[in-house]
Image (tube, rainbow, N blue to C red):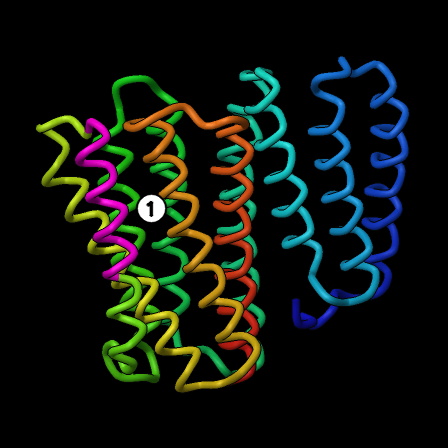
Amino acid sequence: MHALPTPPHPILRPFAAVLAVLLLAALTALIVQPPAALPLWVAAWLTAAWALWALLRGRIGMLLALVVQCGALATVTSATGLLQWHWLFKPLTMVIAIVLVAYSARQSSAGGRLDPKPWWLLGAALVGSLAGDAFLMVEGFFIPGLVSFLLAHIAYIVLFRQGVAWLPRPGALAATLGVGGAMYAYLWQGGLPTELRIPVAVYVTAIALMAAQALGRASVLGDRAARQVALGACFFMLSDSLLATNRFVQPLPLAQVGVLATYYAAQAFIVHGMVVGLRQR
């Protein structure tokens, strides 16, 4: 990831020291993990350690490091059945992402570079995602979760439109609609419930448009931040494809790991890329 402006050094050092102590403590806790769960916890620990390394190298800021680490904990606690901890870390990850956006917007405002509209759109997309996360954690709230993420994708589409034309690369649109259409056909033949066929079709169209707009934007702008946003959009499509396959067609091995790891990668790349891009304006 491209470097964000680093926080003041007196803040960064104690923050990183606390994270390092927690990582060392977690390393000792790995010893008592069941053998079946150990690889998942090791992967989560390595992800958290990477976030600390990236923070110390100035590649990411403190809040994004926390987003990555909380996302790793949300993923591993879901996969290992620690649901009470999962219910904490899953919404907390998106709350921290929202705080990151608000803090970054305030910094831009102090520097006299604030155009509020894209910041509000980014925040709205994250709030929609947070609501979707919360609904999907509760049995029987799939439709509210779907609607929440639909609204998040609409906010992302409008956000990615800022500074570029609508769907500037027809090839990207054809590709994402093709992938989305193939996925929808797979879900249909795999047992997608009748009452969900229209809502899911609308959602698939929206996420395909979101990814197409992000890819087109990256092609037009041609910078690293825009490419990170486009990569995040593609990860979002992958995450939702895994979720839908696991839910409606057949159970996937380590489904929660695949779904959540790609989801948090999507949000992290989008947030980081947008924040960097907006600060560079």
Please tell me in which quadrant of the rendered image residue 30 appears: top right
Q: How many marks?
A: 1
| In front of the other: 145 or 217 | 217
**Residue type pointed to by label 1:** Gly
Q: Secondary structure at mark 1?
A: helix
Magenta span has 168? no
135 relative to 77 in the view: left or right: left
Please tell me in which quadrant of the rendered image residue 61 appears: bottom right
| In front of the other: 22 or 188 | 188
Tell me the quadrant of the picture where the N terminus can be found: bottom right
Residue 155 image offset from top left, x and y in percent: 29, 59
Where is mark 1, residue-wise?
Answer: 128
Residue at (25% x, 50% y) in the render:
182
Please tell me in which quadrant of the rendered image residue 12 appears: bottom right
Viewer can see residue 109: no
| In front of the other: 259 or 137 | 259
Viewer can see residue 171: yes
Residue at (67% x, 70% y) in the render:
4
164 relative to 256 in the view: left or right: left
Classified by dominant secondary structure, the portion drawn in magenta counts as helix
Residue 248 image offset from top left, x and y in percent: 28, 27
Q: How busy is the neighbourhood of tag 1: few (under 14 within 10 Å), some, or many (20 plus)?
A: many
Q: Which residues are magenta?
A: 177-191
46 relative to 163 in the view: left or right: right
Residue at (77% x, 16% y) in the render:
35
Residue 105 image offset from top left, x and y in percent: 50, 67
69 lies above or below 38: below
Residue at (48% x, 45% y) in the render:
263
218 lies above or below 138: below
Residue 241 image offset from top left, x and y in percent: 36, 43
